[in-house]
Image (spheres, rainbow, N blue to C red):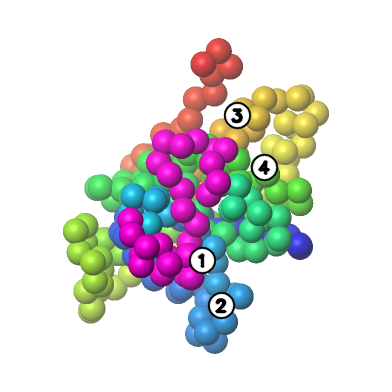
Amino acid sequence: GGQALITVSNHVASLDDPLATAALLPMGALLRPSALRWTLCATDRCFTNPAASAFFRAAKVLPVERGAGMEQAGMRAAEARLAAGDWVHVFPEGTRSRDGRMGHARKGVGRLVAACRQTPLVVPFVHSGMDAVVPRGSALPRPGRSVRLLVGDPILVADLMRTAEEQAWPDDRLYIAIADRIGAHLHALKARLEDAPLSQVRQPANIYCPAC
């Protein structure tokens, strides 16, 4: 395949995908399944029974099991989609925010980026208002709410990949470095969207520990 696309965003509501991701596309693209993203969802949320599993698989959702690590089948399936040059959307926090504040980007997103033979295009976007459209505990969207969405410039990671190769970094160090860069871009973008000083936006980071 050609160059893969990875989009990354904050996660506050159960329908961030597909509602927020659909907003990125022209209307005509929504009618072409080949133009739609792949994404990942926890097995205990989206794949709880045969009917739900069939629906989400048809909607290009890959199952991932919480706590099963980065070698699990769902991650391998996402890597295969990227190897084919497809679009995969990822929520780097790995879970929905309970209070609207963004957590740190977990190293799984770094793994997906690093697994690509050709450095992928990594495009960040953030949104605000989805938690009012689909409040926690609600299954259906509430009409009449407004959502703001801001798309950022592509996040460059080729320098990290090159340094990791030149200095023989352990895989985890590279995954964390990529995840932290993605997280920093998302936090900066969220500060712009909210017109807030960056210092007011939480920016937790991963810690690389060679001995851990």
Task: Give the residue type that dot 1 points to.
Answer: Lys
Q: Which of 176 and 187 is in front in this view?
A: 176
In the image, residue 178 sits, relative to residue 14, either above or below, namely above
| Mark pair 1, 3: CA separation | 28 Å
Residue 33: give its label.
2
Residue at 57 percent across and 59 percent down: it is 88
* Residue at 73 percent of width and 44 percent of height: 158
Q: Is residue 53 magenta?
A: yes
The numbered dot on residue 60 is 1
Mark 1 or mark 4, earlier in chain: 1
N-term-proximal mark, 3 vs 2? 2
Q: Which residue range is magenta in the image?
A: 48-74
Within 10 angstroms of label 3, few (less than 14), some, or many (20 or more) residues?
some
Q: Can you give x and y, in whole percent of width and height, for residue 175 in the image?
A: 60, 35
Assign the N terminus to one quadrant of the image. bottom right
Q: Kindly give the residue lying farthest to the top in the view shown.
A: 211
> Which-is-in-front pick, marks 2 and 4?
2
Measured in 3D between alpha carbons, the distance from the residue under mark 1 to the one under mark 4, in whole angstroms, is 22 Å
Counting from the top left corner in percent of width and height, residue 184 is at 50, 42
Q: Which amino acid does label 2 sit on?
A: Pro
Task: Report, in whole angstroms, how far the alpha carbon at label 2 lies from the one at label 4.
Answer: 26 Å
The numbered mark, 1 or 2, whose residue comes first in the sequence reads: 2
Q: Which residue is under mark 4?
A: 114
Q: Residue at label 3?
A: 172
